[in-house]
Image (cartoon, rainbow, N blue to C red):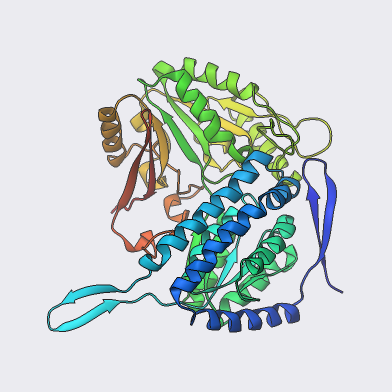
Amino acid sequence: MSATIRTTNPATGQPLAEYEAWDAVRIEAAVERAHAAARAWARVPVAERAARVGHLATVLREHKETLAHLAVTEMGKPVGEAEGEVSKSALTAEYYAEHGPGILADEHVDIDGAEAWVAHEPIGLVLAVMPWNFPVWQVMRFAVPSLVAGNGILLKHASNVTGSALALQELFGEAGFPEHLVTTLVVADAEVPEAIARLIEDDRVAAVTLTGSNRAGAAVGSAAGRAAKKSVLELGSSDAFVVLDDADAEVAAAAAVKARFTNSGQSCVCAKRFIVAAPVADGFTAAFVAAVEALRVGDPQERDTQVGPLARDDLRAAIQRQVEESVAAGARLLTGGKPLPGDGYFYRPTVLTDTGPGMPAFDEETFGPLAAITVAQDVARSGPPREKQADGGRMRCKGWGRFVAASELRRKGAACLAHVAARVVHGQDDRRRAGHGMVHSRHQSLDELPGRCITERVDEHSIQFFGFVRSG
């Protein structure tokens, strides 16, 4: 007897839909069809592939309300953010429709005595294991460039967004892509580890990409390693937002609230830890707490809602544990700190202060509406030691000269400037558990590069860092 996947509306706790999970025979048939479709697609000229992606942008916009409604009801995303996610996906499709052929064009290489060039060729079927928190964007950001490159796609989406996954498969068909080129696999949660391992070993699958937990990444990465296949892993994070002593505390606090509570705090690139220089800590904290308490929590279908429910009840329980254990270890609760009464998986937007190493709110990824403030007497010495860093972060201060100095500070080992596009977890060498590989890049993997960090000026008050840094 086949297992059943049930989706639930996190705003109400009520069931949404049921889907029959696939057994091994049905998965095998789907892989065989997808493999044949990918081989045929690889022979389609790149200009034609790009044109299909351009039409995909149009179809995405036509179905924006439908896709957004699925995200709202399946994982609780506020409707405005859900619509924005679809629009962002359409823009990405337009970008690759225009620039994809140029990116994939042959590159001449100057070699004395020989004519040489680099050619980009399709690799075949790409297996994608995707998370629920951005049910449209997480798929489109890898699928669009993969399709332009001439590859096929096997999508294993998170089970709580199965409706979104199936809708996206239909969307690709409506946009003119061949049948079976993009295939959604409907697999029961208990069967996922075995099914994914089996697919990675399958000779018809050329590569795998995963966005998810460090545990899932370790399993997928090890399976890909055994099969000697390329993989891209985007794993957990604990991003830091740094406020230096010359920052405007109120401006910084307003930016910090947006940085933390996007997607109800359920994003790997949300700022999670706020490391604040002591001279501005009181002003920043007061403004930050006031703004957090003013956030509108409620029905994600309402357009004035800023924070919706957590996607699942177990995720809410995890946030509660992190709060309780951090307070027991010495953190102070400034606001929130408990679930909201009533139906659904809502949690009060929460701020802790006096946090530091040894507390879950500081050491672990907090995937929900929880912010941890650390007051730093010396910003350059705040946070974990250098060997435990993942890279990336946001900083607020005044003046471009100050930005340059801050960037130099980071290069010298300011541990607090960490974690926007990379990840941190427990362990002696956490920065290496951020995952590997790059999406939307000419480079296969940052691990193939020497030490590299990208510094970007966001606005007149902010810079952010992202990338990986090698030491030793």
Where 138 falls versus 172 (above or below)?
above
Where 120 falls versus 139 (above or below)?
below
Q: In which quadrant is the N terminus drawn?
A: bottom right
Q: Residue at x 40, y 61 (%)?
A: 99
Where 133 falls versus 408 (above or below)?
below
Residue 430 coordinates in the image, percent (x, y): 45, 50
Q: In which quadrant is the C terminus drawn?
A: bottom left
Residue 394 in sight here: yes
Residue 211 in sight here: no
Q: Is residue 41 left or right of residue 183?
A: left
Q: Nearer the viewer, residue 98 or 225?
A: 98
Q: Residue at x 46, y 22 (%)?
A: 251
Residue 368 coordinates in the image, percent (x, y): 63, 39
As drawn, the residue found furthest toward the left would be: 112
Q: Residue at x 28, y 58 (%)?
A: 450
Q: Is residue 455 left or right of residue 332?
A: left
Where 12 falls versus 375 (above or below)?
below
Q: Nearer the viewer, residue 350 or 326?
A: 350
Identify the image quadrant of residue 156. bottom right
Q: Is residue 409 left or right of residue 269?
A: left
Residue 122 coordinates in the image, percent (x, y): 46, 77
Q: Nearer the viewer, residue 219 or 155?
A: 155
Residue 289 coordinates in the image, percent (x, y): 58, 21
Figure disc tally: 0
Q: Is residue 153 left or right of residue 21?
A: left
Q: Residue at x 72, y 41 (%)?
A: 317
